[in-house]
Structures are given as C-alpha cells and as structure tokens.
Amino acid sequence: MPPIESLLVLSTASLAGLGLVAGFSAWAWAGWLRLRTHELEQGRGHAADLPAIGQRIDLADLKERIRKLEAIAAGVEL
C-alpha cells in the first residue's frame, strides 16, 4: 500500500487538474454564448438562414405543382 502522503499529493493534483478543466470549459462556453449572441444580433448564423431555406422549399413545391397541373392539362398520366 502506498504511503498516505503520495495519495494526498495525487488527490490534490487530480482535484487541481479537474478544477482547471472545469474553469476552461466554463470560459469556453461563455465565449461561445457571446459569439452566438453577437451573430444573432448581426442577423447572421443558422437562424437567419431559415426563412431563405423555407422560401426555396416553397418555391420548389410550387414548381412541382405547376408541372403536375401542366401534365394534367396536356393529358399525360403521371
């Protein structure tokens, strides 16, 4: 069994390392939140792209409906 001093040093070093990792993670998370907030305020990012994507989907849907109606008018079966 190792001496108690070495276990104390090992546990202290482990807690210090865990504290450093937790602190860095919290700092990085706060930075990411600031970045997202800035992107949303500027109107950039994924949230700003959603209306444009929805409009493209609607346009593609309308084009498909027009093709179907033209085929029906021409007497072609789909």
Image (cartoon, rainbow, N blue to C red):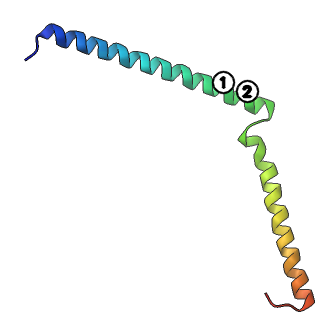
Secondary structure beneath dot 2 equals helix
Q: Is residue 69 above or below residue 16?
A: below
The image quadrant where one finds the C terminus is bottom right
Q: Is residue 48 left or right of residue 63?
A: left
In x, y percent, where is residue 38? 73, 26
- Identity, as a three-letter code, of the amino acid under mark 2: His
Question: What mark, if any, has residue 34 been given in the picture?
Answer: 1
Residue at the image point whose x is 87% and y is 87% from the top = 72
Please identify the quarter of the rendering in which residue 35 is found. Answer: top right
Label 2, on which residue?
38
Q: Are marks 2 and 1 in contact (CB under 8 Å)?
A: yes
Rendered position, 31 above or below 68 = above
Q: Residue furthest top?
A: 5
Distance between the alpha carbons at the discs numbered 2 and 1: 6 Å
Residue under the image location 61 percent in, 27 percent down: 32
Quadrant of res 37:
top right
